[in-house]
């Protein structure tokens, strides 16, 4: 099931099993973990919001992203929490572009 989707849309891989990126907190120097589709996260040390450059994750530009997230959720490939996060991420990008 997953392999079929991966063939269809390579960007999905970042959503299904995102890599963790470590970014240094500009406020306290602590290490903040980002999933590769995230552009901001809370620093576990000082609680400030740390931002990083957005990456070219498919939900940021793909017109099919909302359908894709729905499908992944329905098939149980990602859970409800992840689906909600991705939708939030997607809408933030779309608002920024328009
Ligand atoms: Zn910090």
Image (cartoon, rainbow, N blue to C red):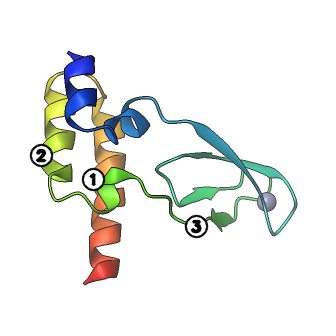
Asked whether disc 1 touches disc 3, contact meaning CB atoms under 8 Å apart, the reply is no
Residue 78 screen position, x and y as percent:
31, 28
User: Which of labels 1 and 3 is toward the front?
Assistant: 3
53 sits to left or right of 66: right
55 sits to left or right of 22: left
- The crowding category of the residue bearing disc 2, from other C-alpha atoms within 10 Å (few below 14, some 14 to 19, many at least 20), is few
Q: Nearer the viewer, residue 96 or 88?
A: 96
Give how far apart the Cα atoms at labels 3 and 2 are: 25 Å
Res 91 → quadrant: bottom left
Residue shown at the point (37%, 30%) measured from the top left: 16
Res 56 → quadrant: bottom left
User: Which of labels 1 and 2 is toward the front?
Assistant: 2
Q: Which residue is mark 3?
A: 53
Asked whether disc 3 touches disc 2, contact meaning CB atoms under 8 Å apart, the reply is no
Q: Which residue is mark 2?
A: 67
The image shows residue 18, relative to residue 98, as above or below, that is above
Q: Nearer the viewer, residue 78 or 63?
A: 63
The image shows residue 18, relative to residue 47, as above or below, that is above
Q: Which residue is mark 1?
A: 87
Q: At numbered mark 3, what does the secondary structure look like: helix, strand or loop?
A: loop
Residue 22 screen position, x and y as percent:
72, 46
């Amino acid at each position: 099931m997953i392999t079929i989707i991966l063939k269809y849309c390579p960007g999905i891989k970042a959503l299904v099993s995102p890599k963790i990126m470590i970014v240094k907190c500009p406020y306290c120097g602590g290490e903040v973990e980002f999933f590769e589709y995230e552009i901001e996260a809370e620093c576990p040390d000082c609680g400030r919001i740390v931002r990083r450059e957005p990456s070219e994750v498919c939900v940021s530009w793909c017109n099919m992203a909302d359908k894709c997230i729905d499908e992944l959720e329905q098939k149980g490939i990602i859970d409800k929490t992840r689906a909600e996060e991705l939708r939030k991420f997607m809408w933030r990008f779309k608002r920024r572009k328009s």
